[in-house]
Image (cartoon, rainbow, N blue to C red):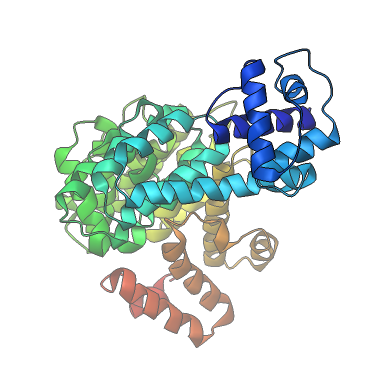
Amino acid sequence: MFSTSMEKKLRDITEEKIGFKIKGLKDSKRLSQIIAKENDIAISYNTIRRFFGVVKNVQASNFTLDTLSKFNSFESYSDFLINFKLRNKWKQEFEVTKIIHKDEDDILLKYINKNLNQTKSFNLKLIQIIRELFLVENFNLIRDIFELKKMNANNFNYDEKVVIGMSIGQIMNTIDIKNEAFNQLLLNENFQDLVITIFVDYGSLKTYYSKIIETIYKNSSRKDIQEFSKGILNLNLFFTKKSKDSFYTLKEEEEFHPILKSRIFAQHLLIEDSEVMLKLNNYFQKNQVNGFIPIEFLFEINFTCIITRNFEVMRYIVEKIKPETDYTFFYKYEHYNNFIFMKLIYYTKMNDHEKITSIDKNFTLKGFSRSYQNMALLYHYIYLYAWNNDIKYLKNYMKLGKKINSTFFTKKYFFEYFN
């Protein structure tokens, strides 16, 4: 099967090179003459007719395969088998880069539309293209790409969305947020679904990120995007220690994604709702599946109870969650890693060395999505200091805390976290 498919590729690239199809005797004789002139190799037109299926096909000889491979600039058919895909890959890379820098937008858009949703590997190429377009600040073309019907978020599974969102989202901090074309891109719904709601840059709330979310909040009419934006803006208000009266009020809709629902519930923690435990119990009952609540319903709650030091909520969740080891999707691994970290914080508060020892070996900061890594690192320094009493953790915490939010992440907060 491999040999047959590669022989077809050899026929295809030969016809592409000569600029015409081999459909009959005349075409076969013409190709025979071209090969003789270019490579000084005599190959009969009858052999060519058989290889291209003009007449009854037979198994191609090594001579035929080697000759046509040499005609296409390979040393032999074996060289063709080994290097065609690699050479073709780099050829495509150079062609795409050339198109981008020559501003041939229509050609690139057609190329993307043709290949979207065909193979998983094309997602990576798509990411490379979009990142390249960000670098040359061609936001209008990026918007055109995201306006394609095939770029609808429903055409990607959650893991694919995460890869796209994280890879593209990271480059937004290099953009002038006053750029009008960039702001128009922010309002594209597919861009919001695949990038904005995936890459949540908690580490940059005090700089560019909250301004991006404000732009989206003021201009979007979609309920889920509105509630998502209000949740992010509330967290920024919390970190800057604004009055709880100034917080936005969020409202859950039944059709919202579980992670968005967890963000909406997490607002009860931010505003220090006195009935949070009663509401948490109701939330668990409402979202149970086969007696357990899926981990995605707790993602934002887990992290928010760490930020707010709500150990009562931590205890409730620790006692309710079913352990998981089989991660069908990578995002579930991230969610359970988030949960494990919350358990480490909780059992540190409880001074339970035995539980900490058994849990810590399953935890890794690399398991956090990049949206959370810097924020998680701050609390990891607090956690490590609690067990090791090493001043280097305070120094690391202060350096990173100053970058993220010096008003909230103070030395006092560091020392008093578990008190």
Can you name the residue that lies furthest to the top here?
Answer: 56
Q: Is residue 136 left or right of residue 326?
A: left
Q: Is residue 139 above or below residue 155?
A: below
- In the rendered image, which quarter contains the C terminus? bottom left
Q: Nearer the viewer, residue 61 or 162?
A: 61
- Residue 166 visible: no
Position in image of residue 2 (x %, y %):
77, 32
Which image quarter is the N terminus in? top right
Of residue 3 and residue 277, the one placed in the foreground of this image is 3
Quarter of the image for residue 142 reads: top left
Image-based side of 94 in relation to 90, left or right: left
- At horizontal 24% and vertical 31% (from top left) the residue drawn is 223
At a point 46% along the width and 40% down the height, the residue shown is 161
Report the number of discs.
0
In-front residue for pair 113/302 = 113
Residue at 23% over, 51% down: 212
Would residue 334 be found to the left or right of residue 40 on screen?
left
Residue 14 horizontal/vertical position (percent): 62, 33
Q: Residue 299: x, y in percent? A: 46, 45
- Work out whether residue 178 can be spotted: yes
Residue at horizontal 69 percent and vertical 44 percent from the top: 39
Q: Which residue is more in the foreground, 150 or 401?
A: 150
Question: Residue 384 at x, y = what percent?
Answer: 55, 74
